[in-house]
Image (cartoon, rainbow, N blue to C red):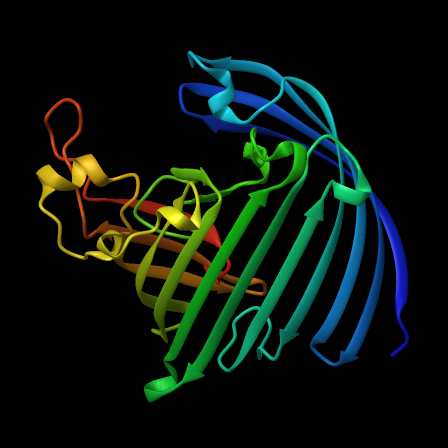
Amino acid sequence: MLARISNGQETIEEYQEVDGGEYRLVRIGADLSVKKEFSRGTRLALTYTHEIVDVRDPNWKVEDTEELRLTLGQEINRSATCLFERDTRLPFFDPHSGSLFRLVAKRAGGIFKGDNNYSKITLSWAGYHRFVANAVLALGLRLGFAEAFGESRQKGVPDYERFTAGGSSTIRGYDEREFGPGDFLLIGNAEIRFPMFWRLVGVVFLDMGNVWPSIREVDRADFDISVPASEFAARRAEDVKYSLGLGLGIQTPVGPARLDYGFRLKRGFLDSGRKEASGMIHIAIGHTF
């Protein structure tokens, strides 16, 4: 198939949380893309983006705002993004077989100018295999790496472009985007999905992962599964989080409407001296991956 050229505009407004408060983030952008489909499910896309980012209404209590890697007011980001995707999932919204591989490489600033210079790479893979009694084994892996360069090396990658983890689509049992932002992301998921009766489906899952300030700060000890609560409280930020759980869903045309409970395998003590919550309930539409 011949390459296709497309363009578009988008405005995104959302509230972002940081340590000590939150702020309003408004992103207005336009992009130009060239896309090539090599075969059904295999495609390559190159995109140039011009974006105005506005950090408004800060409500945080931080002594040194430079730690947040945010600039109040408007910034201009110009970037080029390369996306390669191989998708053989069947069926699309509730896969029983096949896999999805996606690689996204982004370069902001440099020859494209703008107020920030950084590189960002995300890699994800998910595979699906049907086995006993129509149950499906689903495995997923996500990696992310970001690094600033040039004049931005000292201030770093902007927080709104860094990685976060926690919640219904990454590590269940924890708050949405509880961990991060950071420059290195590792998420692993394993699920056994099985039909029950009528439109009800069940799932047993294991999630793991975390976000680190940089890949150089990842240590082998971070992957310990069993850590005393008194010790885990001190190393909670850098340790890999593990959660084990169950889920119940109702099939819809766009995947299951699901209710999941994730149980934290590692728990520490809060400042009050009590142990942190054992887990959390999540409600979402569609599969985690």
Check the image and report above or below for 180 versus 42: above
- Near-viewer residue (135 or 104): 104
Check the image and report above or below for 124 versus 212: below
Q: Which quadrant would the N terminus be assigned to in this image?
A: bottom right
How many badges with numbers are in the image? 0
Instruction: Spot the residue most to the front.
Output: 150
Q: Position of residue 142 (x, y in %)?
A: 47, 61
Identity of the residue drawn at 81% across and 42% down: 112
- Near-viewer residue (240 or 170): 240
Identity of the residue drawn at 64% across and 75% down: 86
Relative placement, left or right, of 202 versus 79 is: left
Q: Position of residue 279 (x, y in %)?
A: 24, 45
- Near-viewer residue (154 or 121): 154
The answer, for residue 166, to whether it is visible in the render is no
Q: Position of residue 44 (x, y in %)?
A: 75, 69
Identity of the residue drawn at 40% across and 19% down: 20
Q: Position of residue 240 (x, y in %)?
A: 29, 51
The answer, for residue 87, to whether it is visible in the render is yes
Identity of the residue drawn at 72% across and 60% down: 82
Relative placement, left or right, of 185 versus 268 is: right
Q: Quadrant of residue 148?
A: top right
- Near-viewer residue (115 or 206): 115
Q: Quadrant of residue 248?
A: bottom left
